[in-house]
Amino acid sequence: MSSIHQELVNIVGEDYASNRREELFTYSKDLGTSQPLWPEYVVAPKTTDELQAVVRLANETKTPIVPLGGGMTLAGLALPQQGGVIIDLKRMDKILEVNEQGRYMVVEAGISHGKITSYLKKNHPNLMHSEPGAPPAATVGGNLAIHGQGDLAHPYGFNTDMVNGLEVVLPTGDIARFGSCAVGSGWYTMHPLPDIGLFLGWNGATGIITKVSLKLYPCKKFRENNMFVVENEEFVPDVLFEISHLGMAEDLIATSSEIPPMMNRLHYISIINTGDSEEELEFKRHMTFDVQLAKYIRNGVGGIVSLYDERSRPQVSKSADWKKGGGFEYVGAIVPVSFYPECYRRGSEISGRHFIPYTVLGRVIGSCHSMMFSWSYAFNRADDATVKHARDALHETDELVMELNGTIWKPAIFGQKLMLERMDPGALRLMKEVKKILDPNGIMNPGNWEVD
Amino acid sequence: MYELKFDPDLCMACDTQDCLVKCQHMDIDQEAARTEILKLAGGEDSFVLRDCVTCYACEEYCPNGNHPFYLIVKMQEELGMFPLPDPLVKSGVQVGIPFRGEPVIDEMEGTALNMGVFSPLLGRVAGSKLFEGLPIISHDSRKMFHYFCQLMYLHYGKTSVINERLDGIIQTLAAHGAKEIVHFHDECYGTYTSYAPAFGIEVPFKSIHLFEFLYNRLLELKDEIRPLGYKVVYQRPCSSRLSSDKHPFVAKIFDLISVEYMDREYKDENAMCCGATILGQKKEGSRVYCAEIQKKNIDDMKKAGGQICVFNCPACMQTLGMPVSKAGIMPLFMSDLCRLAIGEKVG
Ligand SMILES: Cc1cc2nc3c(=O)[nH]c(=O)nc-3n(C[C@H](O)[C@H](O)[C@H](O)COP(=O)(O)OP(=O)(O)OC[C@H]3O[C@@H](n4cnc5c(N)ncnc54)[C@H](O)[C@@H]3O)c2cc1C
Ligand code: SF4
Ligand code: SF4
């Protein structure tokens, strides 16, 4: 038994620390195309105290640590690039407070989005948070560490824009809090204190998020998916712009895919409208279809596919699992909404070159301030040639995003390098300094957002 | 290519012009009706092509079996006046393309049940005494589009798509070797017994309407029938207009299982379309019109005192099932109602 393993056992107990190969095997894998990378240990703390002790141990022994939530990014971001300890945070999943009137909740960061959704549905049915389209096991901490977006992205932006307060364990093992909670006055706002938030979007390379105050929003009684379709991709940005002008849709997503054939070379726009009554919903349908989109219908270039389609949450993406063998990975980019047509055309060309049925999706973030555009590539896990095609397609897509002047979202290591190459030198220097100051021993998820 | 058999002489001699006079969605007097139908028969434009909501009903209204609806659809295509916006037409046409491999042709004799494109509903028939002993065609939802009767494209102004694809579908069905085929959906029944002959397309098997089959089967199981005693209303689908000779089986089944078939405005010949296809039509106001007729229809069901709304067509069920149940009426497929009547549980 190695001494680090023993120390870990001492901190969390025997059941929650392991260096056994069969257990490490699971943690060496990623759902996407990444090659397996093995940790030496895995540990699953239950409390912040335990987590602090683990981080201190790692810092003293200069052992790399990789925080892990649901492990759902698909981009290999929680794989140990340099071995070390994987810290599985899923046991830190308590709901600490729900403030109905202040519309926020404080949670431990290892909690899954699925748990939050079902808890709110049961106990606070008039409140909701922004749930990503990921499988429900995705955690709050992991999602914030990559600037995720959920089903309230259209009205309220990135999930990281919906944070009212944060607690972080720093690479030294110390704790820091941000927002009103930092001055002991509750978890109700992130502002107006000086901005020293250096943890969101960092893939855990600057610290481990342990507590989060999440903004909650009104949850209407009824939620329906209204589907609109156009053939000409050039219309998509305007359709989205017209709908977002109303400021009513809860979620706004455009998709196109080669399979099933009914979606091939067509663009389906899913408009999630909600209401507390049929009258409220009908008003929204009226404004959306009889007013904003009427010109498309009248001219025969856009059509209502379906209305009244009741939509329960969470809405998990099932896209792109069209090759036998059930694997897929996607490149996501944050781009202006106006990029949709070009992203679609170029993406479907890449797919074609790699014999993968194309699947693209664009989710509106804010009032058409930007869009998360994704290109998904399916592969058969048991067929190396298809995995290679998918991997090559992903790299080509990363390069495409750069060529289009987009911003890669949750880039894999390859994409991070492309982004860093183009980074403003001032920002690059600052990133390097921040990392050096916070993590002088370079133990935090090494390889991620690393400035040479 | 197949040609519609439509006889303008029948219209000349016709003394009702019921096809258009009875139309629920247009207000046309007999004289205008005669003018417009003859215009269409002569290949000319008519406002009917724009105002038709494609409810199929005129196929039934015509007392002379002259296929006025097929003529309307044919002319919509010929004059490029599609009722739906282009992307909906494209998506509809693409829906029917099989993409999950070739069907497995298991050989059968005698009578078989064809699920068509509704193999996902197989659970509703599998294991029921009603269908005992019937081999099933199209039981694999991945392959179901190989059995898609294509008639849906009448809503799209696309007889060309039907005519292009139907032969292949018929061959696939026929390859199973069954001499008689019971069609789960009466749109399939309408395809092989009304549309195909109207266009001179040969069908090498005999088709049996689901309701006729259910009625005869219930007669065989008569001793097991428990009178249900519900008050029921019926949502008659558009495709039933292609087999109006089979519509009386609705009342006969209800009678046999002792449910009360409630009188209401939108009953039998005056049935109201579920609205599914009207929703997306490009004619101004279609969405609102669709909502209006759906409301009228459901209000009518409530007024009639229906406890159960019986559906024949899965598309009607998908469109109206939820609002019907929100109105306090239980939506149920006819086959499920019959299963209840012989004491089977339905999920
Ligand atoms: C089908 C599918 C659909 C998806 N749809 C969406 C979507 O709609 N929106 C969206 O945002 N994402 C989506 N994703 C991507 C991803 O699954 C989610 O963003 C998910 O929330 C990531 O959380 P996780 O817990 O799985 O993170 P992980 O994969 O465990 O971790 C992500 C990164 O954060 C680090 N990390 C984990 N926990 C912490 C912590 N507490 N503190 C600091 N760093 C940490 C990890 O080291 C890693 O670098 C989707 C994924 C799939 C498979
Ligand atoms: S189609 Fe039928 S009802 Fe209409 S005019 Fe001709 S014969 Fe008469
Ligand atoms: S199909 Fe219906 S709407 Fe069209 S003309 Fe015939 S009856 Fe009227």
Image: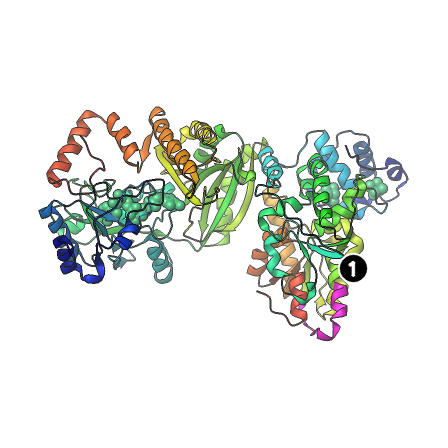
Query: What residue do we see at 70% from left, 63% from top?
Result: B133
Quadrant in the rendering for residue A376: top left
Report whether the residue tagged 1 is closer than 8 Å to ligand 3.
no
In the image, B329: left or right of B251?
left
Say which of A48 and B241 sits in front. A48
Chain label for disc 1: B
Q: Secondary structure at mark 1?
A: helix
Whether A5 is drawn above or below B154: the answer is: below
Asked whether B101 falls inside the magenta stretch, the response is: no
Q: Quadrant of ligand 2?
A: top right
Confirm whether residue B320 shows in the render: no
Quadrant in the rendering for residue B31: top right
Residue B65 at x, y percent in the picture: 84, 45
Q: On the image, numbered disc 1 is attached to which residue?
A: B248
Whether A149 is drawn above or below A123: the answer is: above
The kind of residue on which mark 1 rests is Pro
Query: What residue do we see at 35% from left, 62% from top?
Result: A123
Confirm whether residue A403 shows in the render: yes
Whether B132 is drawn above or below A259: the answer is: below
Q: Residues within 10 Å of mark 1 (few under 14, many from 20)?
A: few
In the image, B40: left or right of B91?
right
Asked whether B216 falls inside the magenta stretch, the response is: yes
Q: Which residues are magenta?
A: B215-231
Residue A280 at x, y percent in the picture: 47, 50
Whether A172 is drawn above or below A98: the answer is: above
Colour scheme of this structure image? rainbow
